[in-house]
């Protein structure tokens, strides 16, 4: 009787081990049949407003058109610069800093300063494209700096001048952690607004 019980114990032990091997092999075969595909990176959907512009024409020495979904505010951090202002995009947490300087035989210094401020973004930039601005009729000349790179703090900067009296510099920033891949639709949207602002830009009397 004891021999029979031992044989039965050996049989059940063998059966359990054999079953585990079969289950393991089946799992391996099933996993080999599945092709692992990396999931594409997803970003939050951003609803963009309809393009519409209004005029900024006050006592400032310049005028231009800006989006109706943006807010113009004086730059409170520039107390001694009455013609500095910000173009705020509350919907996107974005801001275009605009600074103004009267030219007095010092245009080269202003353009060099603008260039140096752009060069500060080189460590994070993958490329910097320079786009010339030449509106002879309005006497608006300058450069746009399109700064490429997912981690750059400012992706779009520019300066314009009439070469004799006026100089304006602008820089676009977003008050979020830099990830310009996810912000790409918004960046392109605001870039087109800046281009419209520059196309509609005109100088007024010298302050």
Image: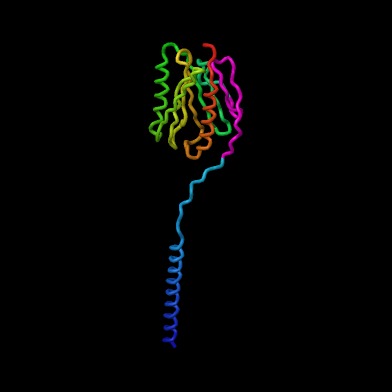
Q: Position of residue 69 (x, y in %)?
A: 60, 29
Q: Position of residue 8 (x, y in %)?
A: 44, 82
Confirm whether the magenta stretch covers residue 47: yes
Front one among 75 and 65: 65
Judged from this view, the residue extending furthest toward the bottom is: 1
Q: Is residue 89 above or below residue 134?
A: below
Front one among 40 and 78: 40
User: Magenta residues, as a range?
Assistant: 46-71
**Quadrant of the rendering where the N terminus is positioned:** bottom left
Confirm whether the magenta stretch covers residue 115: no
Q: Residue 36 vs residue 72: left or right?
A: left
Q: Position of residue 151 (x, y in %)?
A: 44, 36
Q: In this view, does 58 lie above or below 180?
A: above
Front one among 112 and 27: 112
Scheme of image coloration = rainbow
- Please name the residue shown 42% across and 11% down the image: 105
């Amino acid at each position: 009787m004891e021999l029979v019980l031992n044989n039965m114990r050996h049989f059940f032990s063998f059966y359990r081990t054999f079953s585990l091997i079969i289950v393991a092999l089946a799992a391996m075969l099933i996993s080999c049949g599945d092709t692992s595909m990396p999931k594409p990176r997803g970003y939050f959907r951003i609803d963009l407003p309809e393009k519409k512009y209004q005029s900024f024409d006050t006592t400032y020495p310049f005028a231009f058109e800006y989006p109706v979904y943006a807010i113009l505010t004086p730059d409170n951090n520039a107390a001694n610069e009455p013609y500095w202002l910000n173009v705020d995009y509350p919907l996107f947490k974005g801001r275009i800093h605009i600074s103004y300087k009267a030219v007095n035989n010092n245009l080269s210094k202003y353009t060099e300063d603008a260039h140096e401020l752009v060069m500060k973004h080189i460590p994070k930039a993958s490329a910097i494209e320079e786009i010339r601005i030449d509106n002879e009729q309005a006497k608006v000349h300058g450069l746009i700096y399109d700064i490429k790179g997912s981690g750059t703090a400012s992706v779009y900067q520019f300066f314009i001048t009439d070469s004799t009296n006026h100089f304006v510099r602008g820089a676009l920033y977003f008050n979020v952690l830099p990830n310009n891949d996810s912000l790409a639709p918004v960046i392109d949207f605001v870039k087109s607004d800046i281009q419209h602002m520059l196309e509609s830009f005109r100088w007024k009397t010298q302050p």
